[in-house]
Image: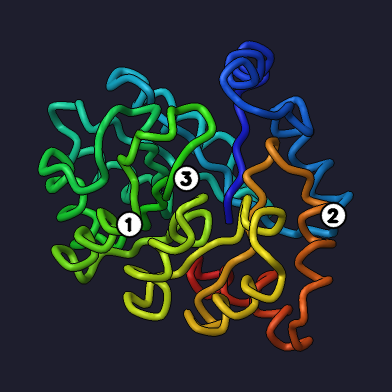
Amino acid sequence: MHSHAFPDELAPKAIDALEAKADWKAFGTGTIDDRLKSMDDAGIDVAVICTIATRPELTEGILRWCCSIRGERIVPFASIHPGSSDAADWVRRIVDAGIPGIKMHSVYQDYCVDDSVLDGIYAAASETGLIITPHCGRDTAAPDDVNRASPERIARVIEKFPDLKLVCTHLGGWRMWDESEQYLIGKKGVPMETSFTLHDLDPRREVELFRRHGIEKILFGTDWPWASPVQERRKLEQLDLAGEELEMILGANAAKILGL
């Protein structure tokens, strides 16, 4: 439910730029072909590809690219920059194009998730059923004092827009696990995906948080190319989960959300 890719001609520059900001190196080239290969290696049938519009003028081109890559195995999520003057209209255009969701990232798009500037996007998404998957918690590319996507802020969005179809990344708050447990886990009922949690959290606590929130709301994610799908799946399978729980997390829950 959480991976990234770029057009072939942009992928090398994008990976280099992101690696310069991150604490780790990519596990792939960032192209669609390499994404499909990584899926084959890990036994993954379908992947969501998340895009990020870092400037308002990129929104249209990203939507065109999303339409060009979608298929039986690739579910693209488009992106809307909050600074777009017609951001709410873009929600409707994305829905009309048959794209099921958008990705938003507070660090790379320079906003806080509960900023009022996003209300138009959230309201339009609530009306149309468009899924929004925001970055949640801290980010390796931002200083530790950046708190733009905290679980507390995300909880405010859910309270203000209860019909919004939100999928929280990183179990509600990367490296803000206590805050996620305080404000989101077991309280708000929003689906959450697992990327960058499996090597940070104690395995027993991870299973406890999964079950407290509800196994039916936990989705497998990797944030590829920033993690290895093979390794992430192996870590998940090593947790003390029942076979039915594992099956739900690895695919059944996501299939319901995406209507597959």
Q: Residue at x 39, y 37 (%)?
A: 105
Residue at image coords 20%, 48%? 114
N-term-proximal mark, 3 vs 2: 2
Query: Which sits earlier in the primary sequence, circle 1 or circle 2?
Result: 2
The secondary structure type at the circle numbered 3 is: strand
Is 213 rendered above or below residue 158? below
Report helix, strand or loop for mark 2: helix
Left or right relative to 152: residue 97: right
Distance in Å between CA atoms under marks 3 and 2: 21 Å
Type of amino acid at the residue the image marks with label 2: Ala
- Give the percent coordinates (x, y) of residue 125: 24, 55
For the residue carrying disc 2, how many other residues have a C-alpha within 10 Å: few (<14), some (14-19), or many (20+)?
some
**Residue underneath mark 1:** 130
Q: Residue at x 48, y 37 (%)?
A: 139
- In the image, residue 235 sits, relative to residue 105, either above or below, namely below
* Dot 3 and dot 2 residues touching (CB under 8 Å): no
Q: Which label is found at residue 42?
A: 2
User: Does residue 58 sit above or below 122 in this rendering?
Assistant: above
Q: Amino acid at mark 3?
A: Phe
**Could you tell me which quadrant the N terminus lies in?**
bottom right
Which corner quadrant of the image does residue 46 belong to? bottom right
x, y percent for residue 234: 84, 62
Placement of the C terminus among the 4 image quadrants: bottom right
The disc placed on residue 259 is none
- Residue 230 image offset from top left, x and y in percent: 84, 52
Amino acid carrying mark 1 in the image: Leu
- Front residue of this view, candidates 197 and 80: 197
Task: Check disc 3 and report the residue beneath it.
Answer: 77
